Image: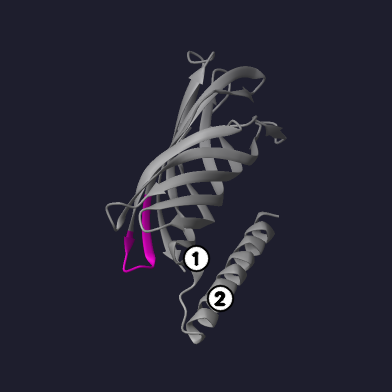
Amino acid sequence: MTGRLFTTILALAVSVRALAAGYDDDFADLGRKPHRRNLRTEWGITAGAHYTGIRLFGQEASMKASPRLGYEAGVHMALRFGDWLALQPEIYYSHTTIDMQADGVDGKIRVKSHAVEFPVLLSLRVLDPVRINAGPVITLMNNSSYIAPDGVKTMFGNTRPTFCYTVGASVCIAQHLLVDARFTGQFSTTLNNFEKADFRSKLYTVSLKIGYLF
């Protein structure tokens, strides 16, 4: 399902980009400048790794969480207002793993979290080629589960609330290569369950991604 989602998004991005290029060519043939000269689009794809930090509330004495490196990948479309400001919506898939330990449970149990997230960023591009990005993140889908000691797949609960926030910076190299560093935090905690124990948690992620701009 996730693969089909991003294939569809990428195909749409390529199609719109091709139409935009054709629009510019039509104006060029007429010897005129396009009216959208100061309002233009930018498409890109990114992929990279992230580190997740997690804090537990309610079971700190009997439970321990050890995050591992995860990965994420997605696409973005920036609507540029002149040379220094852009509105940049994104959609990406994120995979996170957390090793959980609890009293009475032998060893570590790995929780796997899958999420589809939709950041809407304000991107300042005054210090070209550096970009400063910030904005809200909407969690469209989040599914977290683990395999219990008895071999049964068990739901862990959401690790991301509906609304988060992100801040970061990126550098555009040679017009097409993008290096993006970002911190994503949560406004609120989420309710989780591990081996019949309820608790709340709060995560943050620090990511480093490489992208290509069309």
Tell me where residue 121 appears, x and y as whole percent. Answer: 47, 45
199 to 123, vertically: above or below: above
Mark 1 or mark 2, whichever is nearer to me: 1
Q: Verify whether residue 19 appears in magenta.
A: no
Numbered disc 2: secondary structure: helix
Tell me where residue 57 appears, x and y as whole percent. Answer: 51, 16
Per the rendered image, the range of residues in magenta is 172-180
Label 2, residues with CA under 10 Å away: few <14, some 14-19, many ≥20: few
Per the rendering, the mark at residue 36 is: 1
Query: Residue drawn at (45%, 67%), measured in percent from left and top?
Result: 37
Q: Residue furthest left?
A: 127
Query: Residue drawn at (52%, 56%), measured in percent from left and top?
Result: 76
Q: Earlier in the sequence, mark 1 or mark 2?
A: 2
54 to 69, vertically: above or below: above
Instruction: Determine which residue is flagged by label 2.
Output: 23
> Which kind of residue does numbered mark 1 sit on?
Arg
The quarter of the rendered structure image containing the N terminus is bottom right
Disc 1 + disc 2, Cβ < 8 Å: yes
112 to 75, vertically: above or below: above
> Which kind of residue does numbered mark 2 sit on?
Tyr
Position of residue 88 in the picture relative to residue 13 (left or right) = left
Q: Verify whether residue 174 appears in magenta.
A: yes
Query: Residue drawn at (43%, 61%), measured in percent from left and top?
Result: 211
Front-most of 32 and 178? 32
